[in-house]
Image (cartoon, rainbow, N blue to C red):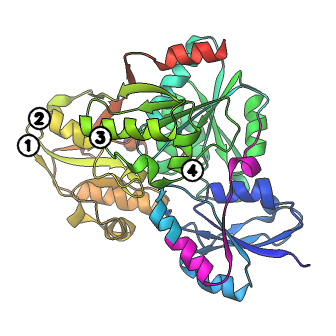
């Protein structure tokens, strides 16, 4: 029998990991291509031969997911592997139905075939949806571990949106490293908080290579998950955040439900801003689907350095891009700050939208007056800068985790919103981590 022709559906993340761990040296299969979605401008590239291995001397092309059906027919594809995250169960099955209608198999790859074992203790932080609170939880966990005298190194879920050949294994310990690697806004949103916290963070494309490099300087590895994906590594302790502002979605999104069922610890975040009905529904689903998990309740209080720059002012609110787009949220920390500090008016950013950001509003039509901090490349960052400078406002409220003035040039007054995880009652993460490591 000949090789089985395969296409891997992805978004420049788990798709590459699935290939590297299962298909790269597998003589039974021929991966004819990847398809790409969710992230702008990642199709049309090539998975290079330096990463693809000896079975693929010419590399592997990356196509748009829009071309999937024709690609299956043209290449006699027998299996399609679905390998990206934060998508509703219903939408996953719509894609499965499309694939099955061509005659091909639709396949999901699990941890058994794709997770890598570390030779150091490994704690993972994941979520059921994008924007649930991984960032502040990861910072909290790293602080606890540091205070215990441990050298923590974080490994972040991939965001390889540039030249894949030079993104095999990236190490970030300073802002200069961010500049050297020409990081996008989305990358900076994930790496800067670690750097500010004194934590070295690794990311890239080849997560076996990344893990072995990180282990050289770590007592403990901290997996910092992306979207609502499950870990690339075997976890010794798996912490998962749920969001009662989106109650019920912990069991209706892929692979967030997988995370819920795999969790050792479940953090119910945003207790301070969710209503009790939402919290109770989340609790009911935890009891139904993962009764053995320990539950930690937490809030994510915000902080603003210059609240007087908001009160009574005309403000533009900027929020974390992925949280608003495929995360499905209508607002984030920036809007909470605008209301808490009594902004006079929130300026509608949508009429000022240009280029790819205008397309973002059209694609994600739940977005209203807030400006998503889109910055997947130099062109999009420039569009964001032009929009900010064109909008008539007194103050810009930035709800992203980064200092956007490092990326854009503006004379507008920018007020940053910070937020941290604050556990409520017992059990708490510190006691759980100490007991586990003991």
- Dot 2 crowding, Cα within 10 Å, few <14, some 14–19, many 20+: some
Marks 1 and 3 sit apart, C-alpha to C-alpha, by 30 Å
Which mark is drawn over residue 267?
none
Identified at 56% across, 12% down, the residue is 147
Q: Looking at the rendering, which quadrant does residue 274 occupy?
A: top left
Nearest to the observer: residue 130 or residue 432? 432
Mark nearer the N terminus (4 vs 1): 4
Mark nearer the N terminus (4 vs 3): 4
Marks 4 and 1 in Cβ contact (< 8 Å):
no
Marks 1 and 2 sit apart, C-alpha to C-alpha, by 6 Å
Mark nearer the N terminus (1 vs 2): 2
Marks 1 and 2 in Cβ contact (< 8 Å):
yes
Identified at 56% across, 47% down, the residue is 258
Q: In the rendered view, does 346 fall on the left or right side of 99?
A: left
Marks 4 and 1 sit apart, C-alpha to C-alpha, by 37 Å
Q: Quadrant of the C terminus?
A: top right
Give the SS element for disc 4: loop
Q: In the rendered view, does 99 fall on the left or right side of 411?
A: right
- The residue carrying mark 4 is 182
- The residue carrying mark 2 is 311
Give the SS element for disc 2: loop
Which mark is drawn over residue 344?
1
Where are the magenta residues, as a range? 94-117
- The residue carrying mark 3 is 278
């Amino acid at each position: 029998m000949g090789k089985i022709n395969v296409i891997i559906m992805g978004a420049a993340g788990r798709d590459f990991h699935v290939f590297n761990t299962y298909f790269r040296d597998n003589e039974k299969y021929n991966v004819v291509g990847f398809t790409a979605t969710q992230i702008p401008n990642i199709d049309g590239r090539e998975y290079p031969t330096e990463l693809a291995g000896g079975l693929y001397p010419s590399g592997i092309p990356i196509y748009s997911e829009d071309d999937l059906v024709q690609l299956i027919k043209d290449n006699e594809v027998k299996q399609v592997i679905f390998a990206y995250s934060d998508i509703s169960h219903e939408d996953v099955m719509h894609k499965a139905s499309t694939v099955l209608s061509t005659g091909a198999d639709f396949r999901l790859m699990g941890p058994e075939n794709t997770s890598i074992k570390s030779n150091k203790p490994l704690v993972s932080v994941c979520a059921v949806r994008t924007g649930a609170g991984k960032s502040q939880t990861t910072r909290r966990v790293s602080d606890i571990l540091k205070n215990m005298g441990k050298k923590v190194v974080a490994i972040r879920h991939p965001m390889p949106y540039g030249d894949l050949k030079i993104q095999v294994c990236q190490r970030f310990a300073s802002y200069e490293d961010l500049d050297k690697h020409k990081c996008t806004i989305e990358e900076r949103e994930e790496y800067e908080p670690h750097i500010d916290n004194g934590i070295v963070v690794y990311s890239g494309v080849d997560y076996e290579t990344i893990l072995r490099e990180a282990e050289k300087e770590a007592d403990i590895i901290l997996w910092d998950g992306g979207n609502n994906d499950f870990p690339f590594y075997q976890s010794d302790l798996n912490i998962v955040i749920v969001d009662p502002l989106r109650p019920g979605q912990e069991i209706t999104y892929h692979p967030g439900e997988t995370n819920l069922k795999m969790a050792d610890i479940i953090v119910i975040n945003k207790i301070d801003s969710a209503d009790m009905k939402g919290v109770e529904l989340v609790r009911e689903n935890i009891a139904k689907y993962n009764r053995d998990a320990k539950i930690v309740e937490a809030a994510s209080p915000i902080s603003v350095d210059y609240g007087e720059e908001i009160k009574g002012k005309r403000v533009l609110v900027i929020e974390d891009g992925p949280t608003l787009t495929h995360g499905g949220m209508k607002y984030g920390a920036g809007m909470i700050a605008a209301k808490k500090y009594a902004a006079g008016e929130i300026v509608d950013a949508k009429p000022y939208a240009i280029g790819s950001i205008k397309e973002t509003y059209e694609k994600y039509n739940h977005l209203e007056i807030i400006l998503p901090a889109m910055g997947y490349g130099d062109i999009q960052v420039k569009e964001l800068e032009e929009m900010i400078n064109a909008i008539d406002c007194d103050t810009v409220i930035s709800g992203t985790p980064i200092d956007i003035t490092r990326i854009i040039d503006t004379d507008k007054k920018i007020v940053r919103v910070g937020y941290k995880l604050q556990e409520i009652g017992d059990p708490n993460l510190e006691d759980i981590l100490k007991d586990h490591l003991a």
